[in-house]
Image: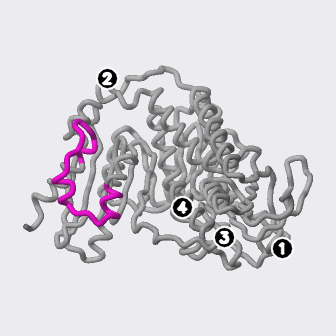
Amino acid sequence: MLGRYEFIVIGSGPSGRRAAIQAAKLGKSVLVIEGRMKVGGVSVHTGTIPSKTLRETALNLSGWRERGFYGRSYRVKKEIGSHDLSMRLGKTLTHEVDVLEHQFLRNGVATMAGFARFVDPHRVMVTSPDGSEMVIEGERFLVAVGTVPFHPGNVDFSDPDILDSDEVVEIPRLPRSLTVVGAGVIGIEYATIFSALDVAVTVIEPRDSFLDFIDREIIEEFVHQLRDRGVAFRLGSPVEKVEKAGDGRVLTTLKDGRTVRTEMLLYCAGRMGATADLGLETCGLSTDARGRLAIDPETYQTEVAHIYAAGDVIGFPSLASTSMEQGRIAACHAFGLPLPPAPAFFPYGIYAVPEISTVGMSEQEVRDRKINYECGIARFRETSRGHIMGLEQGLMKMIFSNKTRRLLGVHIIGEGATELIHIGQAVLNLKGTIDYFIENTFNYPTLAEAYKIAALDAWNRMAR
């Protein structure tokens, strides 16, 4: 069916691919249009997979995980260059693309390389890499184009020493010092990855705080760890000017007059929805100042009922995991498949060094709701597994209702946090209580024992 499809997906990132496969499993004719020569979207090529691969490579080559035993000077590879970082990335990306292409093939999803733009509410013009154009008609559409880095006018991104969050995955060389502008999830992840490679990092953030959706006690521990290893923070003032100093280094001047001078600068202060060239005006759609589309949070429909949007292009939380679910919900709604209610809680994972993961309410949220609560803390060094691994830091915080004994939130910082969180997620969504953690047995020795330690810590202080 060359010129007409029941479902056209623009973009093949997490939300796009999940939606396309879901629609195909419902027996619909599906076309995925991807601007890159390879499928996968931002997630595979410049975002989620590259940044996490870079993190794993940095931790392995630097010997980071073994320094608790062998000291801060320990390294697996003494001289780490950009080629060391890129080799593993290339293999990982090839594998990811192969898997995704196989999934599309197996489910009968058609794919096309090219840039799509709407010519009217039911037709798109696709410009192929060779310049040829084709008009394709669709009954329903999903806009899943993701985002592109925001480029302010006062930063010269043509300078090879000034990178955005897409370019950093192909960093030309490993600098001795790095300025990271923006303390959002992306900025913090890269700042800590380069710090683990013994790069001197300075983080600039115009606000007085960062990662405000994370429990404050976890952030306090996080900042303490980073400052302990030499990461500098310049909070509370925006960047006014970025220029090259006489010594060839990048000189960043803040509005309050402070300056930072480093070999390279990584700009991570915001991303824009990649919607500028989609021709949305021909459909009666508009975006906000950041290029994002407004949707119905229950169905992911835009103002035009047969056009859906999902993933980073609709904004927060901009997580690959939630984007996949958004795409699935959109496809199911588009073709009348009833959906069970979404789980009340889903986990956040921040792949910094150290990892942070959280599910449920923070302590501040619990207090704002005036819930009578108690907290329990477990430090990874209290577990036998933590000693075996040489962990000196890392903690788990659990919050319980004093009245119902139910689990309200789990917040973890440290090795394996993004894996450990799923135990808390399951208990939380199943409305479990503190008794689950106290009465059940955990494998020994594991970091998961921290759940029992933290639960007992809370139980010791709860009214009984």
Q: Quadrant of residue 284?
A: bottom right
Residue 163 visible here: no
User: How much space separates mark 1 and mark 2, taking CA atoms?
Assistant: 64 Å
From the image, state whether disc 1 or disc 2 is nearer to you. 1
What is the span of residues highlighted in magenta in the rendered image?
A: 424-450
Query: Please, is residue 148 above or below residue 298 in the view?
Result: above
User: How much space separates mark 1 and mark 3, taking CA atoms?
Assistant: 15 Å
User: How much space separates mark 3 and mark 2, taking CA atoms?
Assistant: 53 Å
Task: Check residue 425 for magenta coloring.
Answer: yes
Which residue sits furthest right?
132
Label 4 sits on what residue type?
Glu
Label 3 sits on what residue type?
Tyr
Query: Please, is residue 334 above or below residue 60 in the view?
Result: below
From the image, state whether disc 4 or disc 1 is nearer to you. 4
Q: Which residue is mark 3?
A: 308
Q: Residues within 10 Å of mark 2 (few under 14, many from 20)?
A: few
Q: Which residue is mark 1?
A: 120
The percent coordinates of residue 316 (x first, y second) are: 53, 65
Q: Which residue is mark 2?
A: 70
Residue 72 visible here: yes
The percent coordinates of residue 376 (x first, y second) are: 20, 56
How is the protein colored in the picture? one colour
User: How much space separates mark 4 and mark 1, taking CA atoms?
Assistant: 28 Å
